[in-house]
Image (spheres, rainbow, N blue to C red):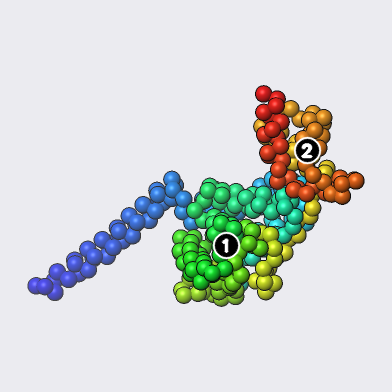
Amino acid sequence: MSYGIEPLTTGTYIVGALGLSIGLAGYKYVNCRHYECCDNQWVDFKVTELEEEFNKNLFGQHLAKRVIPKAVNTHVLKVRPKKALVMSFHGWTGCGKNHVSRMIANHMFTKGSDSEYHHLYIGSRDFPHKQEVNKYRDRLRKEIEEATKKCERSLFIFDEVDKIAPGVLDALKPYIDYHENVNGLDYRRNVFIFLSELVKKDLIDVYVPFLPLEKKHVKKCILAELRSRNLRTDAAIVDRIASQLLYVPEEVELFSVSGCKKVNQKVDLFATDEF
């Protein structure tokens, strides 16, 4: 008699397994409508919107405007790229490297820089001590592996690269080199961005020099900041705020020493005086 029951038992098992599979798929669908998941609803690079924001809010960086959207878009469109995309942004303080990195995150993830797939490391904060290099390497390996398990389209940004203890970034090589997988994980769809100084040339795919900002570019930054706060934008006000920054050479005031980095602070002071 046991043989007569077997088909029913097998069929019940198949139906149960199918039901469980459908149930899990349904749960994931509902869950991912409300909570961030690694799918196209939450991870979807919008190159046209990035280009529009560059044209509106990035000043004096024609090379960055031309190179970055194309490089990122070409990479994310590939289902199986040969390696992770690695870019180096280098140039003067305040010329827009962090600004551009935030823009990329904002147009790569629905939640922007608040996405759990966006990872920011700052050299002076995260990896400052030479005597702790091994600990830092272990931390990086663990965090990059865990991040990629959650989403193979993650964004890793390393700011103040020149302040990272020597040898720490060596831990990244397996994850940004030409490997189909490392310990069973594929890291090739990730994007890595290094800010400040250059890292080893063999690790970089795209170099993007950020040019010193001229006084005319700083005035555009000031104008954009004033507009974003609904403050007056007279030419006299823009000139007044611009005059509070330092420029070189002093005799002609051509390039801003701090780029647009201190514009927000100077506009704060202006707003306080106004109100």
User: Dot 1 lies on which element?
Assistant: loop
User: Dot 2 lies on which element?
Assistant: loop
Residues tagged 1 and 2 counted as in contact (Cβ below 8 A) = no
Sequence order check: which comes first, mark 1 or mark 2?
A: 1
Who's the residue at 17% across and 71% down the image?
Answer: 6
Who's the residue at 22% across and 63% down the image?
Answer: 12
Q: Quadrant of the C terminus?
A: top right
Mark 2 surroundings within 10 Å by alpha-carbon count, few (fewer than 14), some (14 through 19), many (20 or more):
few
Query: How far across and how far down the image is residue 168, in percent?
Result: 57, 69
User: In this image, 35 relative to 219: left or right?
Assistant: left
Q: Is residue 182 above or below residue 95?
A: below
Amino acid type of the residue that numbered disc 2 sits on in the rendered structure: Gln
Query: How far across and how far down the image is residue 148, in percent?
Result: 49, 64
| Numbered mark located on residue 244 in the image | 2
In the rendered image, which residue does mark 1 sit on? 128
Mark 1 surroundings within 10 Å by alpha-carbon count, few (fewer than 14), some (14 through 19), many (20 or more):
some
User: In this image, 22 relative to 255: left or right?
Assistant: left
Does the rendering let one see residue 194? no
Amino acid type of the residue that numbered disc 1 sits on in the rendered structure: Pro
User: In this image, 8 relative to 200: left or right?
Assistant: left
Query: How far across and how far down the image is residue 230, in percent?
Result: 68, 29
Query: How far across and how far down the image is residue 192, in percent?
Result: 60, 63
Who's the residue at 54% across and 59% down the image?
Answer: 126
Q: Nearer the viewer, residue 252 or 121?
A: 252
Q: Quadrant of the N terminus?
A: bottom left
